Image (spheres, helix red, strand yellow):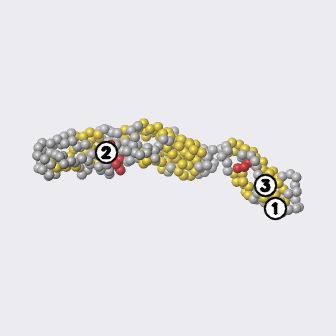
């Protein structure tokens, strides 16, 4: 504001009554300008209304019949974000084994954006990784399956939030650890702070399956055994599929009349594709006779 007169000029900002005009702030809103003097006014603008605008702002001057008028024009647009791929397809994956793919999110707008990623229809309870599962010897989940009090959170994004400068990008790792045998069709959504939710999305597809593992030999012969003396034999678990598999021997429910006790020093493990795992089984015969015991 400039005072072109020869007297002091007290001024006051007249608040705008329009929806866009009310989003502008002026500092200071009032004051006195000396003759031939100037007053710098800071203008702040924050709006969620999209589109072009043209607003007039008035400053009344004491003793003047006409206000000083400032016209501001502009356009409000949503920041533009783009993924470098249309879809992430994990293909066929094995139950409980994490798989990671990458994508790039680019900020093509002239302003920095603060983003947060989320997956549609994903759960909240952390999924179980096979590497963690094989450490749980004797866990009921080996026999009854993994129990979730809530739906499993099977997707993780790294980073899941951050700020991208104009014309810059952020590389993102998307990891799927499926605890559900199903076909996945999800959308990774981008929420922008101060602008809205789901302003960009990326399709995520996958098929989760459990590989079929074979046991051989199907019968372990221990021949003649003495009572309460441990004897060890080994069998193999074969994986003839393209996918890694996870196995676990179910602990024996020993009873007073169990004729044979059995256990394994290596009851849990992972069998890689087209490979075998060797499982030792130790038995202790409790009663005289010929016995046949199922190891699960």
Q: Is residue 264 above or below residue 210?
A: below
Q: x, y percentage for residue 104?
A: 51, 46
Choose top left, top right, bottom left or bottom right for residue 177. top left
To which residue does mark 2 refer? 142
**Separation of disc 1 and disc 2 at Cα?**
81 Å
Which residue is found at the position 29% from the left and 46% from the top? 248
Which residue is found at the position 72% from the left and 44% from the top? 53
CA neighbours of label 1 inside 10 A, class few (<14), some (14 to 19), many (20+): some
Which residue is found at the position 49% from the left and 43% from the top? 119
Hey, which residue is sitting farthest front in the picture? 256
Choose top left, top right, bottom left or bottom right for residue 241. top left
Which residue is found at the position 72% from the left and 54% from the top? 25
Q: Secondary structure at mark 3?
A: strand
Q: Secondary structure at mark 1?
A: strand
Q: Secondary structure at mark 2?
A: helix
**Separation of disc 1 and disc 3 at Cα?**
12 Å
Q: How many marks?
A: 3
Q: Is residue 174 left or right of residue 31?
A: left
Task: Pick whichever of labels 1 and 3 is earlier in the sequence.
Answer: 3
Between 8 and 82, which is closer to the camera in this rendering? 8
Between 55 and 283, which is closer to the camera in this rendering? 283
Q: Is residue 201 above or below residue 40?
A: above
CA neighbours of label 3 inside 10 A, class few (<14), some (14 to 19), many (20+): some
To which residue does mark 1 refer? 32
Residue 275 visible in image: yes
To which residue does mark 3 refer? 13
Q: x, y percentage for residue 157?
A: 48, 48
Q: Is residue 148 left or right of residue 234?
A: right
Residue 88: image tag: none
Task: Pick whichever of labels 1 and 2 is earlier in the sequence.
Answer: 1
Choose top left, top right, bottom left or bottom right for residue 200. top right
Q: x, y percentage for residue 89?
A: 45, 39
């Amino acid at each position: 504001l400039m005072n072109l007169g020869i007297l002091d000029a007290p001024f006051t900002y007249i608040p705008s009554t329009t929806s866009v005009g009310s989003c502008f702030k002026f500092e200071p809103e009032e004051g006195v300008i000396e003759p031939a003097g100037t007053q710098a006014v800071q203008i702040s603008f924050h709006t969620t209304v999209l589109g072009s605008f043209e607003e007039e702002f008035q400053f009344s001057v004491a003793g003047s019949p006409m206000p000083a008028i400032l016209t501001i024009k502009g356009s409000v647009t949503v920041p533009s974000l783009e993924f470098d791929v249309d879809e992430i397809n994990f293909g066929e994956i094995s139950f409980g084994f994490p798989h990671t793919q990458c994508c790039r999110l680019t900020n093509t707008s002239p302003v920095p954006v603060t983003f947060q990623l989320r997956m549609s229809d994903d759960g909240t309870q952390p999924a179980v990784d096979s590497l963690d599962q094989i450490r749980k010897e004797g866990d009921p989940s080996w026999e009854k399956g993994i129990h979730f009090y809530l739906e499993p959170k099977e997707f993780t994004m790294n980073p899941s939030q951050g700020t991208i400068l104009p014309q810059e990008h952020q590389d993102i790792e998307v990891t799927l650890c499926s605890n559900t045998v199903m076909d996945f069709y999800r959308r990774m959504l981008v929420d922008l702070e101060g602008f809205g939710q789901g302003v960009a999305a990326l399709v995520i597809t996958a098929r989760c399956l459990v590989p079929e593992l074979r046991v051989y030999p199907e019968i372990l012969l221990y021949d003649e055994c003495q009572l309460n003396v441990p004897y060890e034999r080994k069998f193999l678990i074969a994986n003839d599929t393209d996918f890694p598999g996870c196995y676990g021997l179910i602990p024996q429910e020993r009873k007073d009349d169990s004729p044979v006790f059995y256990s394994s020093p290596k009851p849990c493990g992972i069998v890689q594709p087209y490979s075998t795992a060797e499982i030792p089984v130790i038995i202790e015969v409790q009663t005289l006779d010929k016995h046949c015991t199922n190891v699960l």
